[in-house]
Amino acid sequence: MTGQLCHNPSQTAGQTVVSELRGPVVIVEINRPEVRNAVNQETAGRLLEELQAFDRDPELKVAVLHGKGGNFCAGYDLKMLANEKAPLKLEQDVRKDPGPMGPSRLQLSKPLIAAVSGFAVAGGLELALLADLRVVEESAIMGVFCRRFGVPLIDGGTVRLPRLIGLSRALDLILTGRPVGAQEALAYGLANRVVPNGQALQASLQLAEEISSFPQRCLRADRSSAMHSCFDASSFTQALQYEFDHGVPVIQEEAIPGATKFVGGEGRGGKFSSD
């Protein structure tokens, strides 16, 4: 992996983003707890680098995004923004990296899980929306808190949120900026799992390990088709064609060996190997 992986906690001082390998899983952590993991330009760049490195590394299967010190991310660092002497330089072409929060324009080829504790608000909510799954602690708060200060959602929030929870609910959150607790987030589909406080990271790692245990080419083909259907397909027919074209090559490589295992007695009765 080309990103900088940190295995020793004593080496994290001064690093705004730290990473740790757990077998085929990489944990990427925002390390600015003194500002509730608000993101500045350096942090945005490092987040982008780490997730790009994850996506390129053939040995890694799932990434977990987390915030150190009890908060996921409080959004862009408004103190830094207020003290900017010159206009903020942002890449205007959304086909290019980075987004203001860093990796928000990425279309990852492998699953990303957000382990959410404390605040995941404003741009921090947008980072959580980048993930495929969100594991949320009971006391976590999500919301478009930047509504209060005239800071727009320009990291995919207005694009991903309506797709995830529907336009009506998304507009409720976008227009009011109100806080959303874990149970409401779960009912909306904004959270995929709610876990006790302090357990989001561990629960996310367990989920990542489970996902990593499946045949990966098939999993990624199905994931890619779902994403394409939601965001890029021009029609139902085109989405079906994409699904078929990307699914068929998997049959020889993974489906036939998988069928052979089933015939041999593995996975009968819906049993998973991890059960």
Image (cartoon, grey):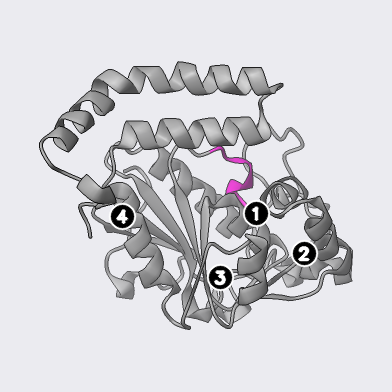
Residue bounds of the magenta highlight? 102-107
| Closer to viewer: mark 2 or mark 4 | 4
Q: Which labelled disc corresponds to residue 101?
A: 1
Left or right: where does residue 228 sit relative to residue 255?
right
Q: Quadrant of residue 83?
A: bottom right
- In the image, residue 234 lies at what x, y percent? 71, 21
Q: Quadrant of residue 55?
A: top left
Judging by the rendered image, the residue that carries numbered circle 4 is 210
Q: Residue at x 67, y 46 (%)?
A: 99
54 or 218: nearer the viewer: 218
The three-letter amino acid code for the residue at tag 1 is Met
For marks 2 and 4 on the same chain, the one whose residue lies earlier in the sequence: 2
- In the image, residue 210 lies at what x, y percent? 31, 55
What element does badge 2 sit on?
A: helix
199 or 17: nearer the viewer: 199
For marks 1 and 2 on the same chain, the one whose residue lies earlier in the sequence: 2
For marks 1 and 4 on the same chain, the one whose residue lies earlier in the sequence: 1
